[in-house]
Amino acid sequence: MVFLALARAHSVALVGVQGHPVEIEADIENGLVTLLLVGLPDTALREARDRIRSAIVNSGESWPNRRITVGLSPASLPKRGSGFDLAIALAIMGASEAIPAASLNGLVLLGELGLDGRIRPVPGVLPAAACAASAGFAGIVVCDENAAEAALVPELKVIAAPTLAAITLWLRCGGRFACDDVTVLEAGRDLRIAYPARSSAEPAGKDLADLVGQPVARRGAEICAAGGHHIMLLGPPGVGKTMLAERIPSVMPRLEPQAALEVSAIHSVAGTLPPGRPLITDPPFCAPHHTATRAAIVGGGSGMVRPGAASLAHQGCLFLDEAPEFGRDVLDGLRQPLESGEVVIARAAVTARFPARFTLVLAANPCPCASARTVAGGCSCTPMARRRYLSRLSGPLLDRIDAKIEFLPVSRRELLSDRGFTEPSTVVADRVVQARERASARLAGTPWRLNAQVPGSELRRRFAPAAGGLAPLERAMDLGRVSARGADRVIRLSWTLADLAGLGRPGADEVGYALGLWSGTPQ
């Protein structure tokens, strides 16, 4: 007697944050009892054989004691992780006629199986669900913990099941009857993002008004938040560099729906979504330690390619404290995403792309002993030692920084007098939102939304400052103090200053102040 059965299921493989549909075929035939996986599975996926067998048996189902071949197609696409467990198990059960094979049509199955049959959460559900919807699938089956994340894709029906036994029962009845353990979220729901009101009175909140005695630095943070500009903070310890960097996200606008989905997809792939919050609505803030490797900052990995800190800070802030202490190759690895807004990681079998459009905030001490220009004047470093310390930040990297701000030690009198001029983050955030709205209206019909994103050619062709406004910049270029890239960044800064002031075009005052910010000598 010849026994031959075949069933198909579908899942999704992720390359970066891009999903690719995977067809899983299970073939059962007479032969030596074994389970073969073909189609470029990784180690975690090869180990799925024992997990799947135990999960099926412990769910009260019978294991077909025949030769089982599971093919993952396209075979040339690497498949990594344990998210294929559920699809492989149900394909095998469909081939053995434990469930109707037709019940798997139109469904994407995503989840890791425990030995007792529980369906466990996996990372990357949001981009996988988006891929399933764009590929025309009607629904996706996930565990209960991943249901809210998958439901962010409104075109897709979400079936949440806690165990393999529960989803098996639901499939046997064709989904026509309610199952107490299976929850079905119908497709067609609108994505509505709830934005809780920001309150500076929250105990754990970080407010810009906390930084006292540094009015120029507060103004620089507002300008960079309004235009998406990169900023460098230079000064001795204790003057407020870290305090300012941590408060820049508090004056940035909440993420728009599309940006929120992008950011959430990246954090979903990285497995860093906050518990109970499948959608990130606030600009992220990422502050890696200076011992972080290039792969940790830019992204990569020996097995599965994972996003780095640059991508986790997408649409938010990447803060590098003690920037000269980072490896030079780590810092120079940021030059590509600073220009292109994405990280491209090439491997022998695959090329992964991660969005990485962030606001870079660098902080550094003026010298190795960190005592330069203090009131006591106790610095023991030679001029050569100071230059060598700051030269760890390469010229090409510094040329991509829009604003450089020096923090100076402040006296008690300056601290007391400045308290009356500080503004809470909510007030500054309102001005930032208004400035971004002016920039967005001006850039309507273009692929850019922030002044920092406009290329230099378009600045000169379509967005030139007012007549005579470039005079300060032209003098600096004649003296060789500003490069061509620096000139573009000065003009972008001047447009942000004009937007904050409600001006139609930047003039000489705005260009002059922007030049001071770029050179590190704002007045």
Image (cartoon, rainbow, N blue to C red):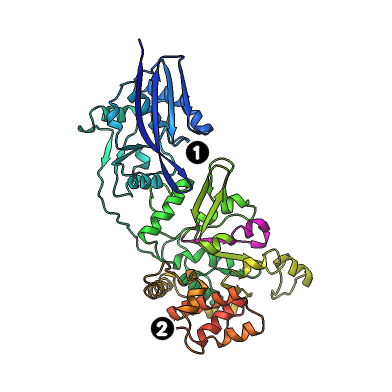
In the picture of the structure, the residue carrying the numbered disc 1 is 78
Q: Is 41 positioned to the left or the right of 334 in the image?
A: left
In the picture of the structure, the residue carrying the numbered disc 2 is 504
Residue 429: within the magenta? Answer: no
Report x, y in % for residue 321.
61, 61
Report x, y in % for residue 485.
58, 73
Give the residues in magenta.
315-335
Per the model, the C-alpha gap separating discs 2 and 1 is: 52 Å
**467 relative to 319, above or below:** below
Q: Is 97 positioned to the left or the right of 431 in the image?
A: left
- What is the residue that sits farthest to the top in this orientation? 1
Residue 317: within the magenta? Answer: yes
Report x, y in % for residue 23.
39, 35
Secondary structure beneath label 2: loop
- What is the residue that sits farthest to the left in this orientation? 177
Mark count: 2
Report x, y in % for residue 115.
43, 26
Q: Is 340 positioned to the left or the right of 277 in the image?
A: right
Q: Amino acid at mark 2?
A: Gly
Could you tell me which residue is drawn at 36 percent across and 18 percent down? 4
Q: Nearer the viewer, residue 405 or 44?
A: 44
Q: Amino acid at mark 1?
A: Pro
Q: Nearer the viewer, residue 112 or 425?
A: 112
Q: Earlier in the sequence, mark 2 or mark 1?
A: 1
Could you tell me which residue is drawn at 51 percent across and 70 percent down? 229
> Is any atom of residue 199 visible in this view?
yes
**1 relative to 500, above or below:** above
Q: Which quarter of the figure is the N terminus placed in?
A: top left
